[in-house]
Each structure stands twice: as structure tokens, then as C-alpha cells.
Amino acid sequence: MNAGRSFANRGEIPIRIFRTAHELSMTTVGIYSYEDRLSAHRYKADESYQIGERGQFSPVGAYLAQDEIVRIAKEKGVSMIHPGYGFLSENASFARKVEAAGIKFVGPRPEVIDALGDKTKARTVAIECQVPVVPGTDGPVSNAEDAEAFVEKHGFPIIIKAAMGGGGRGMRVVRDMESLKDSFLRAVSEAKSAFGDGTVFIERFLDKPKHIEVQILADSYGNVVHLFERDCSVQRRHQKVVEVAPAKDLPREVRDQILADAVKLARHVNYRNAGTAEFLVDQQNRHYFIEINPRIQVEHTITEEITGIDIVAAQIQIAAGASLEQLGLTQDQISIRGFAIQCRVTTEDPEKGFQPDTGKIEVYRSAGGNGVRLDGGNGFSGAIITPHYDSMLVKCTCSGHTYEIARRKILRALVEFRIRGVKTNIPFLTRLLTHETFIAGSCWTTFIDDTPELFQLMKSQNRAQKLLAYMGDVVVNGSSIKGQNGEPQLKTEVIIPKLPEVDTTKPCTKGWRNILVEQGPEAFAKAVRANKGCLVMDTTWRDAHQSLLATRVRTIDLVNVAPVTSHALSGAYALEMWGGATFDVAMRFLYEDPWDRLRKLRKLVPNIPFQMLLRGANGVAYSSLPDNAIYHFVDQAKKNGVDIFRVFDALNDVEQLRVGVEAVKKAGGVVEATMCYSGDMLRPGKKYNLEYYLALVDQIVEMGTHVLGIKDMAGVLKPTAARKLIGAIRAKYPDLPIHVHTHDSAGTGVASMVACAEAGADAIDVATDSMSGMTSQPSIGSFLAAIDGSEIDAGLNAAHVRELDAYWTQMRALYHPFEANLTGPDPDVYVHEIPGGQLTNLKFQASSLGLAAQWAETKQAYVLANTLLGDVIKVTPTSKVVGDLAQFMVQNKLTMEDVNERADQLDFPASVLDFFEGLMGQPYGGFPEALREKILAGKRKALSERPGKSLPPADLEKIKKDLQAKFGSATDCDVASYTMYPKVYEDFRAFQEKYGDVSVLPTRYFLAAPALGEEINVKIEEGKSLVVKLLAVGPVSEATGQREVFFELNGEVRPIAIDDKKATVEDIRRPKADPSNPGDVGAPMAGVIIELRVKDGQQVKKGDPVAVMSAMKMEMVISAPVGGKRLGLQGC
């Protein structure tokens, strides 16, 4: 056969044929459509030629162009044509034209294709051979009326089948009269599109049968053998998904009868070459012939694996005139060994009804190893998957000595695949292969449709590709992190400190948390009060970086230092590390899960209590929420690692405070009910004086708290005031633990905290030296030095504290882009009373609004705004109200008199309206009613009670189900996040879907692009890391406005297409369906609209068909989701 030249169709089957042809020393010729010009089969052939000119044929029509194909074959001296499967493989007319041209047709004779390729004729042949058949029509059915007549005689269910094809094309199961006509028309249309012939017939549909097929081979001399059977019962829409050889649970006598009937049929029609006799086996093990496919099948590979016979080689040699005996293929020489399983890996999305996916394959890494066979077509990096052809990428076939070995092997092989850029059915296949029914080998033809749990899929994480997409975006467009100014100053690896003679590779187990875990909150509070010194809480992990670095410190940088921290601060009262603004910012700006941060840090610091900031009835949100949402949030926080809850209300509204306190009690946490300190209580006539605070403490004690918190947000608690306030509380409540928080805005923080300690406070707040001072907390080193030699003991090793600070010195350089650039203390804080955390944010906001040059004026306006509001406690969110009003006044050049006089004419910021409505609670002394009435006039109704009291309970179960439906998964923590910040949470999940978990990226590369050639190690989980190197950045594409960024990932080059946001391109956008508008009917998949069922202005009912789409030879009817009138068709 040295001079032979073979010729085949498209996709994976020509590649399969070419390989065998080359083994037989034949040269190969391929054909391709214009749309297939980049397909792999073109390059696997020795020669390849395009079918027609561009636009002459449709993408499918090119492979159905009989005369053009024969012309090319004759012109190029082809000696035989192998039709593969699909397209013209079962077309007798084509076979005749091939043979008439003097070219051998690798397949049955044309008259046999006529007799068997038409399934209605095949039924007649089976009846002649006395082979049982399923009750059906005697011949083709030409119209829906004939179909109705068959139903009247035999009843439902029925199956409509294309007479000239297979593979599930042109096939519909019908169970009721209402859908009969439409299903008939769809089957005819699909058959004509796929096979060029719309002939169909009808059979009675068997319930839960097995689909068994027999591989036959026959030569030109009347000899026929079988190569045993295959179980093809796992199907979807009559398209085989997984095939097994031999059938695992078919009784021996049934198998023998089926094999005998297959051979009988082939002999009766004088069959030649390869073919497949297909049968259904019902639940009583009765078998029925359904068709003979006069061609090679997709799943022939599993037969080859169990018999060791190259079926394609046999086909070619039989076509060349060889007999079965010459090929050594007599029945007594054919045996089977073991089992083989084939999975068809397709570009289909199981979660969307197996809609075909299209696009560019960005990454393709296939499986391999012992017993793994891959037959691929367009499975390679860079391949473009179009909607024109079948969605199959590769056939994965695995063999083993037993069925279970083969099953485990193919499962392992599928896990090895890495395909990125398009969706695949691999998650579905792995779920199917692990289902108990498949493990038992007892599937049936509708098993997939009957088993909804198969669609509970484990999603591929696609972590590496998503991270490269994020890094590529930073390379092309720069950082998108809000508030960033420039790049990190730290350009080297961060050095993790070590403590002398301490093993910091493992977390410390000694600390105050042990008492809490072993004995509970009450015992913990008693132990704290009994302690002779004054403990410290380190705020570095929350308030310190909130105050100095816009809350931008990331989880990875806390995790890196956590084990060392557990040792260096083992004697600390607590670490403030969660809640407040950090919760919001983690999702909104850092794209991190705050719950993930909590769990990771809890594992690494098991010995020190964690404290969070809880805004009373607001949770960690900025306005009141339903009470059950607060209870749910607190419960999750406690379960995931929070120990102490500093509960406060921005207005010191005890009723608001009580909601959070009761939630913490129920969850089993330490209650630190907190009063907010505002202004200088030493100033004569001050609204918030000593009597006010003592009365508030009385209410808190009566409510019940483990620890009393005092929160000085602005840092205005002077040392003298501290002694008076703490001393008075201690005198009245000698057994009550007191914990004081302040900011060092005026530079007097250390002195004030020493005064608190001397007056009887049990714990005070400080921050590591490099993250202290100004709007942050007082310096821990300075506080320890200040009490050195006194009777006050903080229980810490000052040397260890200094070693730990070396890490945070590096962090200030790393996070330099978020510095507030404060130059020193601001004693004016005693006048303007701006909270420390707000001061930096207010400066940033002023700059964003173009008010940077009017910063001094803004601070003065802050004082005036506070007066207008009635002198409120200034803590988030009320401090934001004051700040918003102040900036509003500066921007609009308003005086206090202007605001009072024109309040009913001005459009105030939403936060101001919220405050006056009462959504933040009731301020001490009441609202300035005259101003309140004007501001709310005609806009809102004033509340007179706690806002959360009138809110209906949140439907937490529904929220969870909705989140699962939208994002595929949702935990109770996700529900808690959503109830706090619905939009922020949804945006965060959308970001993660696009870029993955970016929290694993080192901060340098999260905020800035790496240098060309710089090697980066990214640890994505324990024992797994990525080695990434930026290689090059391509030019902007004028057509798409994209750049290709080339990375090296673990030694492999990966190009990533990134939108260049600075590029100017013609942007043609087509309208898309709005998911929130039920009247918008979106296309369910990429494809072509082949039929419109309604006209503009036509009235439609819910469920009415509006259009028919076709993609990858599959047709889908689109139905109206709601009733209404068609307004138009857009986006085509």
C-alpha cells in the first residue's frame, strides 16, 4: 500500500485515520473549510486543501459538498476516501460518486448504505432476519399528521429519529400531544442541517433501557466477525457521553444472542467493511434492534483497546481487497481482555444545560500515563472553538484489567487535564464517574436526565490562569486599588523576624485565650480584673493600619508575621484584628474574604484572644439591619475565631447597643459593651461631661457586660480627664474590668494611657511602634518604657516587642502608596474632634473632591457641622455624617446660617438624611428639631424608635439559596457578608470569578507590575506554588484594543489577552439581555438564529416559543420567560 493516498473528513477522526495510514506507509490528504483553516487535522495530513472559496459554502456545507470533495480527490490523485463519521459517511450518493470516480470508498457498498443507513429500511431488514425490533413506523414519516396517527395507535412516549444519521442529531423524545408538532419540525430541521436529509421515522420509546452496540467487520468475500459489544447507555440528548467495553452487567445469554443477531444482519445484506449494530435492552433483558451505522463510530477506540485490533487499519486493508483471514481476523482469533472506558471531553457547560462554549483555548494540558489513550482534534493551546462544528475536544480512553481499574484510571486522567479559556464538561464527567450507579455499571439511556445530583459539580478553580489575568491587568493598566498613590517603596523580599531562643516556626500555646476557651467569658473577665498590672491590646492588625494606611494591609502580610506575633505578644489582652472598616475594605478594595482572614489568623495565633469591632445594631454595616441578621453575623464570627466583641453605638444609644450585646451573649463571646468618648469633658458646659458618662456606665452595667469598653475615637481623652473618668468608674464598680481605646492624634496618647492604667484600667490599646502615633494608637514601646520601674506590669517582653516591630517597619515601606502623609501631632483635634481613623479618609475625600487646598477650611467646617447636628458622638457612621456635611458646606460655600435658612431647599448628602431620619438611632439630648423638620420636609419621615425594630427579619435561608443559585456556592459566612454589604459582596464574588483568590499574591505584585524577567513564587496552598515570570508585553491590537502579556508559568509560556484601558478603538457593542429584567430574552448560547416565531408587536404568553437557535449542529427553542409584547430584536 506504499502508493496509496487516503482522504478523510474533519476534527479528531481524520487525525486518527492519518495516523493509521502513515503506519501503513500511505500518504494522506486532508480537506478543510475556510472556518477550519486553523484546525489541527489540516496540519496532520501530508497535504491539505480548502473546500471551495471563502464564502462559497457554509461551515457545515463545505463538508457536504460531494462534487467538490470528489473533484479535489481526483485532482490530487487520491486512491481511497475514508469518510470518518458524520457528514457524508452514511450517504450512498456520495459513495457512488467516489466509486464512479475510480476511488475506493472505505466503507460499505452504496446499496448497503441505502439498505442500512436509512433506519426505516434497516428495520425491514431486521424483520426479514427475525431479529426483534421496537414497534415503530413501517417507513419514513413525512408530516406531523402521520406522527399523530402513529401515536393514536401506539401511545406515548415516542422517539422521532433522523433516518440518515446518528449522534443524537435529529432526535426528539415526545411525551405529550402538545409538543409533538414542534418536536417533529425540530427533528426534521436538525436532521437536514446535520446530514443533508430531513427524513425521519418514529418508534415507541422504551423506558430506562440500556444501549448496547456491536462492532462488526466484514470483508468483500462474505466473511463477517464481531469485535464484541459496547455499552453506550450514558447519553444526553441521545448523544453518547461515556462508553464502556464490554458491557459490565449484561447477562451472558443476552450478550451471545445480541452478538449473533448482529452478525446475522451483516451477512444478510452482504455487508463490507466496519459497521455497528445497535440494540436496546429493556429492564426484562429483552433486546431490540434499532439500527446499523454503516461507518466507524466515535467510540471504536474502546473496542480497539479490549481486542487489540486496529479497526481503521482493518477498514483500509479491507477496502484494498484483503480478506479477514489474511488479516488474522477470524472469529476464533478474536478475544477480549479487561475493560475500557471512553469519555468525550467537550466544550460544553453542564451548569447551563450543556450549552456549547466558544472562544480561544488559553491553556491545554492533557493527561497521559499507563493505559491512557487520547484521540484529539482541536485540543491545543491557541485553538479557536467556533459554534459551527461539534463541541468535542478530545476522546479520553482508559483501559484496565477490571472495570474498576479502568474507571479509576479515567477519573485520574480527567483530573490531570487543564483546559482554560472555554468551559468543558470535565467537572460533570468526574461527577458521573463517581456516582454509585456508574460504579455498579448499571446505567440506562436516560440516566443523566433522571439523576439531578449529577449536576452538583465541583468547579475547576483555574487559579493560575486567573492570577495571571490579574497580574497582566496590573502590567498593562496599573493598579486599580482605590487610594493608591505610586508604587511600594519596598522592592525586596520581606524579612520575617525571629525571637532569640524562641521557636517561632510554630504558634505559641501560652496566653490569656486559654482561660477563655477552658473556663468561659465570665472566668476570663474575672481573671483580667484580678490581674495586678495593666494588659495591652495591640491594634496593629486593624485600627492602626485603618488610621495610617487606609485599611489596606492585606491578609498575606498578617499571616506571614502571625506565628511570631503569637510569641512576642503572648501576654497581651487581645489582638484587635477584625470588624469595623476592615470587613468592608477587605472585600471592596483588597478583594479578599474577611472570613478567610479570620480563620487563617486564628489557626496561627491560638493563644491570644481576638477582638472585633461591632457597631451594635448595625453589625459591621453603616446602618441598622434586622436583628436576626446581627445575631447570625455574630454567631458566625464567634464560630470562626472572634473571642471579644467590642460593641458600641455611634450615638451611645443604649437600645441600639443592646442588640449587639444580646447577640454576643447568645453566641458565647466576651461582651465588651462600649461607651464612646467624645470631646473634652473637662471643658465647662460640655454636653458630654463626667455625669453623662457615669450615667451611661450605669445603664451598660445594668444591661450586663463582661468588660466595659471606653472608645476615644478622636484621641481627645486628656491625661487629667482619664484619671477622673477611670477613677470614678473604678470607685463605683471595683469588680468591673475596664478597657480603654484612644488615638494619639494630639501626641498625648501615651500619657493618657499611663493615666488610665494608674487610675485602675485593666487593659489599654497600643500599636507596634512603626504603626503608632498621630491618628493611630499610642506606641507600645513608649507605653512599656513609661511604666518601666512602676508597679504596672503589661506582661510583655519589651525586647520581643521591638523585634516584632522590625517587620512593621518594612510594612510601612511596602504600603507607602497609602500613606496619609501626616507630619506630626495635631493638637487642634481638641477643637475639631475629628476621629483618628476618619482624619486620613477625610483628607483623601477632600482631595478627590478638589478641596485639598481648603483642608483647613474643611476642619473648621467640621466643627460647624457638628454644631448644626446638635454636637453628636463622632464615631463611624455618625462621624461620616459630620464629615459629609462639612465637605458639603465647603463645596457649596455655605455658612451655618445658610444651612439653617435654606435647609428645605438644599439636596443634602444621603448620610445626613439618614441621620435626621433616625436610621442611626436617637442622639443624646435629641435632634435639633427645627433643622430636622426642614431637612426631611417632603423627603423622609422621622423615626422615633430604634430603626431595626420596624425592619422585617432577613430571610437568611432564601438569601443562601439565592447566592448558591447565582454563584454556585454559599456558606453561612457568605450569607453574613451579604446581609452586611449586598452590593460589595456581589462585586467581590464577581471579581473572584474573574481573577480568583488574589490574596495569595505577594503585596508587591498585587499593587505593582513585576520587572521583566523577575521570577515570582506564589504559594496558592500548602505544598503548591506557582513560579511566574513576566516575559514580554505585546503591542495594542487596533481591532480589539488588547495587548498580549506573556508570562512563564512553571516553565511554560502563557499568553494572556488584556484590555488596554488607554487604547482607542472603535467599540461596537451589541445590546445584551438584562438578567434583572424578565422581559429581556437572552440567547442561551452563542450561535445562529435560524427561525423567528414572533413578529414585532405580537402578543406572546409565558412559555411561547419566540425563536430557534442553532449552535454546533444542536438546535434549541427559546421560550418567553414572561407574557407580553415583542418590542424588537437586538444584538444580531
Image (cartoon, rainbow, N blue to C red):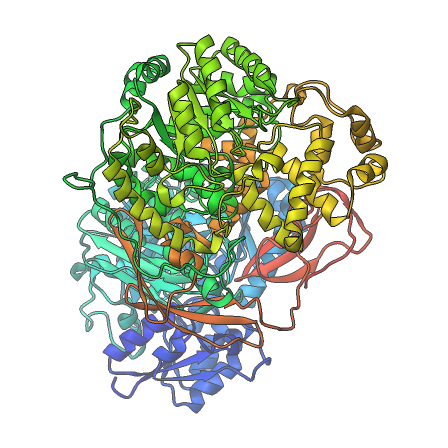
Q: Position of residue 658 (x, y in %)?
A: 55, 17
Query: Which of the 4 image quarters holds residue 215?
Result: bottom left
Is 746 left, or right, of 362 in this rendering?
A: right
The mark tally for this picture is: 0
Residue 29 vs 751, above or below: the answer is below
Is 457 left, or right, of 366 in this rendering?
A: right
Can residue 768 be seen here?
yes
Which residue shows up at 44% across the image and 41% down it?
773
Q: Nearer the viewer, residue 413 or 107?
A: 413
Is 802 left, or right, of 999 in this rendering?
A: left
Which residue shows up at 29% across the image and 49% down it?
411
Q: Position of residue 983 (x, y in %)?
A: 59, 41
Residue 548 vs 298, above or below: the answer is above
Q: Nearer the viewer, residue 55 or 418?
A: 418
The C terminus sits in image quarter:
bottom right
The N terminus sits in image quarter:
bottom left
Q: Position of residue 227 (x, y in %)?
A: 26, 58
Is 727 left, or right, of 303 in this rendering?
A: right
